[in-house]
Image (cartoon, grey):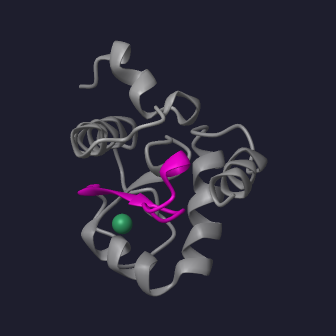
Amino acid sequence: MVNMKDKNYFFALDIPLIITKQFKNKNDRLIQEYITDRDKLCILYQSRPDCIRTPTSGHHLIKRRYLLSRWHPYNVFGLCVNCHKWAHDNEAESEKIIIENAVNRCIMSDDTQFYKLKERAKK
Ligand SMILES: [Zn+2]
């Protein structure tokens, strides 16, 4: 369970100017904990036939090298091992379905929240 006092560590606007390896490691761990706690079921459950339901890792839609979105809760979603592999093999299709499902599950109120983040993250 993530201590919500720690939540500022992975919100986009709070990223410090100098990012140390320790900062990355700590926040990579925190975001994974947060995502597994938030997404009790694989976000692609009900969208894919070979889904095994239990999310084992947080999948980044916008690649991890973009630090503005690396620890943002709208960019990381819990996937089971089968769906995670599929998502990497089918990036465009999986992004669309993951965002749709996130809105349906009320993780985001609408898809523009993700697309705005994506636009900012890559600048
Ligand atoms: Zn799955």
Q: From this view, report whether residue 39 is shown above or below residue 83.
A: above
- Name which quarter of the figure residue 79 lies in: bottom left
Q: In this rendering, would 114 be left or right of 46?
A: right
x then y, percent, for residue 71: 43, 43
Q: Quadrant of the N terminus?
A: top left
Q: Quadrant of the C terminus?
A: bottom right
Ligand 1 location (quadrant): bottom left
Q: Residue at x 50, y 42 (%)?
A: 72
Residue toward you, 5 or 21: 21
Q: Is residue 57 magenta?
A: yes
x then y, percent, for residue 90: 51, 84
Number of marks: 0
x then y, percent, for residue 24: 30, 44
- Name which quarter of the figure residue 122 lies in: bottom right
Work out which residue is located at the far front of the displayed protein and give it: 18
Q: Residue at x 61, y 79 (%)?
A: 93
Q: From this view, report whether residue 3 is shown above or below residue 29.
A: above
x then y, percent, for residue 102: 58, 49
Q: In this rendering, would 28 be left or right of 76?
A: left
Q: Which residues are magenta?
A: 54-69
Q: In this rendering, would 4 be left or right of 16?
A: left
